[in-house]
Image: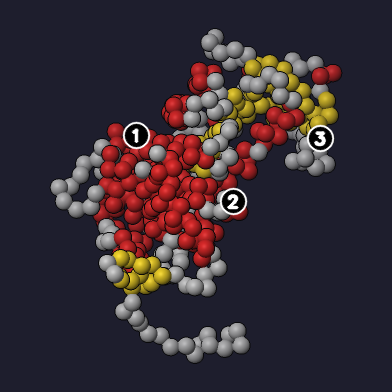
């Protein structure tokens, strides 16, 4: 019964304005309410005397990413969607999208990065968070583009970096970097832009930072000290850190129940450690150690070490370790989402064009995060973009003109019909609520 008509059905066409992307206007509406369209039009890029505005091109790219497109040519599906064209209007072609991305240079790309930060902070403010936890993490995207660089593992591609909001599992800012770039490159400058914006728009909200060893640099710590940001940063085991660890007395080590590695005997201790920078004070250094499984012939060190530089002086060491490790469940999952939804393929040959595209990908993820946290029910807040796309964005509907109005008709038996209808009206009210 289930497979009875798999090969027996007949195929025909209809003149009705059918759309396969009934949820894409929700994404565009959310972006409009957040001021993204207006921000696109403010970008300092060279405009043509006629044709599409920057907002029309940028919003089209947002729609492609939200709908699951992986290439600029995928805009053909949106352009050929009669119902969507009736709802939104004519969309630009793939070559127009590529030309727009290639116009970005230093000043305009800087402005686009600022638009990403501005939009993310607006979502954080609208959500009313009591604390903001910023996670810093880089990830590698393999690519065969001619200007791709080779990383330390011998892989070719690019090495973007993202700062994410752990509470919302949402990117806040990011940098597009060549594959051979150091993981430490440009983190302090981007972090300062994010913190400055948060301090301006969300005064009084505590900010805390978590980072892997890429953030273990004096520039990052100086930013945290300047703006009162608490931090936990994985310390690189350079000579100074190794010397500090070696100075910990034997009696200071205590047994630590490490739930991350069951069956492994782990010990914990803490001391203080200072950078060579005279302007920076000494901070807590929490150290974990465990016996090596295998040792080299001339290896005299029996332990493996993991050290965390911490700004808070009173929080118990075990809680600090747990808090710091939660970064893996937050930032790394966000980076995985970025890799699977937007940056799996790079659309252009030019580095600066791909850098601009990366910022648009970040915007697409911020807008969908805003949908989940500001519009959709609480149970939807943990959904991935792929699941949200399956449930709501790639939804079939019929568009009709009637009584001087446009009507979008969705299936009566659609499982999330009430959610979709509520989201439609709530998106329209977000701008008023944020104003």
Query: What's the CA distance linking mark 3 and mark 1?
Result: 46 Å
Residue visible at 28% across and 39% down? 43
**Is any part of residue 143 visible from this angle?**
no
Q: Which residue of the protein is positioned furthest toward the left in this rendering?
A: 49
Q: Which residue is mark 2?
A: 378
- Identify the image quadrant of the N terminus: bottom right
Query: Mark 2: which secondary structure?
Result: helix
Q: Nearer the viewer, mark 2 or mark 3?
A: 2
Q: Which residue is mark 1?
A: 110
Q: Which residue is mark 3?
A: 257
**Is any part of residue 262 visible from this angle?**
yes
Residue 229: x percent and y percent? Answer: 55, 24
Residue 29: x percent and y percent? Answer: 39, 53
Q: Image quadrant of residue 322?
A: top right
Query: Mark 3: which secondary structure?
Result: loop
Residue 325: x percent and y percent? Answer: 67, 36
- Residue contact between numbered discs 1 and 2, judged by CB atoms under 8 Å: no
Q: Which residue of the protein is positioned furthest toward the front in this rendering?
A: 403
Residue visible at 41% across and 64% down? 22
């Amino acid at each position: 019964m289930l497979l009875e008509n798999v090969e027996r059905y007949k195929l025909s066409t209809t003149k009705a304005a059918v759309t396969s992307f009934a949820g894409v206007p929700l994404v565009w509406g959310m972006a409009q309410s957040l001021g993204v369209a207006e921000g696109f039009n403010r970008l300092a890029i060279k405009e043509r005397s006629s044709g599409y505005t920057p907002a029309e091109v940028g919003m089209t790219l947002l729609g492609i990413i939200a709908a699951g497109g992986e290439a600029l040519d995928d805009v053909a599906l949106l352009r050929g969607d009669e119902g969507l064209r009736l709802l939104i209007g004519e969309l630009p072609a793939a070559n127009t999208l590529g030309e727009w991305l290639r116009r970005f240079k230093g000043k305009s790309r800087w402005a686009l990065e600022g638009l990403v930060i501005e939009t993310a902070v607006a979502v954080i403010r609208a959500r009313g968070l009591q604390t903001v936890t910023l996670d810093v993490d880089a990830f590698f995207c393999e690519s065969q583009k001619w200007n791709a660089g080779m990383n330390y593992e011998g892989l070719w591609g690019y090495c973007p970096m993202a700062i994410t909001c752990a509470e919302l599992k949402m990117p806040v800012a990011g940098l597009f970097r060549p594959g051979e770039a150091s993981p430490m490159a440009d983190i302090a400058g981007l972090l300062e832009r994010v913190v400055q914006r948060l301090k301006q728009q969300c005064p009084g909200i505590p900010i805390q930072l978590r980072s892997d060893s890429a953030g273990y640099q004096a520039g990052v710590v100086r930013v945290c000290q300047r703006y009162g940001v608490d931090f936990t940063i994985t310390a690189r085991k350079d000579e100074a850190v190794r010397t500090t660890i070696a100075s910990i007395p034997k009696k200071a080590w205590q047994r630590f129940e490490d739930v991350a590695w069951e069956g492994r005997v782990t010990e914990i201790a803490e001391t203080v450690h200072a950078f060579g920078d005279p302007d920076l004070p000494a901070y807590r250094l929490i150290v974990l150690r465990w016996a090596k499984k295998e040792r080299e012939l001339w290896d005299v060190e029996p332990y493996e070490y993991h050290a965390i530089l911490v700004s808070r002086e009173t929080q118990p060491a075990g809680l600090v370790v747990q808090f710091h490790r939660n970064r893996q469940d937050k930032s790394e999952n966000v980076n995985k989402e970025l890799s699977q939804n937007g940056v799996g393929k790079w659309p252009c040959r030019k580095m600066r064009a791909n850098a601009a595209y990366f910022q648009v990908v970040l915007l697409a993820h911020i807008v969908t995060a805003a949908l989940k946290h500001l519009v959709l029910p609480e149970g939807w807040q943990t959904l991935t973009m792929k699941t949200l796309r399956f449930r709501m964005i790639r939804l079939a509907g019929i568009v009709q003109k009637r009584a001087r109005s446009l009507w979008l008709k969705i299936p009566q038996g659609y499982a999330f019909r009430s959610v979709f209808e509520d989201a439609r009206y709530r998106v329209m009210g977000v701008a008023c609520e944020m104003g």
